Amino acid sequence: MSSPSSSRLRIVRGDITKLPVAAIVNAANSSLLGGGGVDGAIHRAAGPQLLAECQRIRARQGGCKTGEAVITTGGQLPAAHVIHTVGPVWNGGHKGEPELLANCYRNSLRLALEHQLPSVAFPGISTGIYGYPKGEAAVIAVREAQQWLASHEYPHEIVLVAFDAETQQLYEQQIA
Ligand code: ADP
């Protein structure tokens, strides 16, 4: 029997590349070839093996569509795996952005379930360069995490990583 879903969701402030979880999620772009923000930080910390694995996935399936997710190993990261998902670019909110962002969380969590990963940490997907309003993104992140935990055994724990104080506060408000 798994523990109640409330104790399985954690908010952590800091750098996602340092977390010793089974998988960290990367806010990638559809090329899977790396970029700025958290994507750049993850590739730098993981080392060249990560790009090589992403290139193999690209050769096989031609990148990753918005809302979808793929999994690689973690290279030199403390996390054994990286789940790469492509968030929507914010375009005013009426171009399917909320559903696409929810899909990022669901498809990443589905990969964690398929690989029976005990713990997964998410950055604020789309809330940097892609311009998704942080408050609206926090509502979706917390809702999707809670809904998943209520009906799935894996991952046992979901960590929402806040890179700044504002995001931390937004997550904590949603959970309260
Ligand atoms: P996107 O292109 O999906 O918007 P970004 O990488 O620009 O992705 O930003 C996504 C979120 O990740 C932002 O809220 C940003 O503050 C945060 N972020 C950037 N670097 C890190 C890091 N090392 N650890 C955790 N979060 C990070």
Image (cartoon, rainbow, N blue to C red):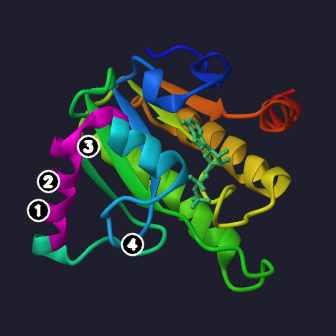
What secondary structure is marked by label 3? helix
The residue wearing badge 3 is: 114
- The x and y percentages for residue 164 are 76, 34
Q: Which mark is residue 42?
A: none
Disc 1 to disc 2, how far (Cα)? 6 Å
Q: Residue at x 45, y 41 (%)?
A: 41
Marks 4 & 1, CB-CB < 8 Å contact: no
Disc 4 to disc 3, how far (Cα)? 22 Å
Marks 1 & 3, CB-CB < 8 Å contact: no
Closer to viewer: mark 2 or mark 3:
2
What secondary structure is marked by label 1? helix
Q: Which residues are magenta?
A: 45-58
Taking the magenta stretch, the answer to whether it contains residue 51 is yes
The residue wearing badge 2 is: 52
- The x and y percentages for residue 53 are 15, 52
Q: Amino acid at mark 4?
A: Ser
Q: Residue at x 29, y 35 (%)?
A: 46
Closer to viewer: mark 4 or mark 3:
4
Image quarter in which the N terminus is found? top left
The residue wearing badge 4 is: 30
Disc on the earlier residue, 4 or 2: 4
Image quarter in which the C terminus is found? top right
Q: Which mark is residue 56?
A: 1
